[in-house]
Image (tube, helix red, strand yellow):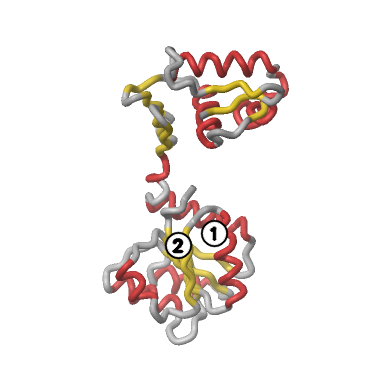
Amino acid sequence: MHENIEIVVIEDEEDILELIEYHLNKEGYTVTGFLSTENVEQFLEEETPALMLVDRNLPGMEGSEFVSYLREIGYDIPVIFLTAKARESELEEGFEAGGDDYMCKPFSPKELTLRVKALLKRSGALQKQARVKHKQLTIDLNKQDLYVGGEEVSLTNLEFKLLHTFMKHIDKPLTRDFLRDEVWGVEGEGVNDNAVNVAINRLKNKIDPQNEQNYFHPVWGVGYKFN
């Protein structure tokens, strides 16, 4: 999903580095890890990562000194510091050096992925991911707009959620129960199969009234497939 978003991790403890790489890869990011600041500058000359995770306590050059140096030579890549140092003066040091966020060790994988996502959103790197395209359809997740062949088509909130759910699972049979959970959420319990079918038909008539694209396929005994 985020495969074109690249993240650099500088962490001298190999097991922590591997763990961070594993969890970020799982979220779909491209990750390059370094055990020290050596070679990082050279890497930045060739690549433009969207984010850097930098351990404070690095061999050779301390993490915040390195980031401070990068800022001086003109790199403005967002940085999250990883640190066992949680004293206020040390936090201040990190922010003054040009850090954008901070995580104190030990941290949970969930905290890691949430902070990374939040910072990528703030820096605009995730905005580029906000458009999802398929055949004639383009949806803009930020504005909740839909374009069919370049023309804007207005959808209700529910229809937009329904379409987005199908576009995330192209060619996969989705059960009505799954659609109820994803689209209606808590209110889904009161929604019967017929109501799901009706919502899908209404959506189909808006996005493909002549059925030229043939998006929706009933899957006998399961639900629907979108392709």
> Number of callouts in the render?
2
Amino acid found under the numbered disc labelled 2: Ile
Q: CA distance from mark 2 to mark 1?
A: 8 Å
Q: Which residue is the extreme one toward the left?
A: 73
Which badge, 2 or 1, is on the more N-terminal residue? 2
Badge number at residue 24: 1
Residue 40 lies in quadrant: bottom left
| Residue 122 at x, y percent in the picture | 41, 51
- The 10 Å Cα crowd at callout 1, few under 14, some 14 to 19, many 20 or more, is many
Across and down, in percent, residue 192 comes to: 70, 17
Q: Residue at x 55, y 33 (%)?
A: 171
Q: Nearer the viewer, residue 59 or 34?
A: 34
**Which residue type carries mark 1?**
Leu
Q: Is 142 rendered above or below residue 44?
A: above
The reply to whether discs 2 and 1 touch (Cβ–Cβ < 8 Å) is yes
Outermost residue, bottom side: 60
Residue 112 location (% of width, % of height): 57, 59
Q: Quadrant of residue 42?
A: bottom left
Q: Residue tagged by mark 2?
A: 7
Q: In front here: 140 or 86?
A: 140
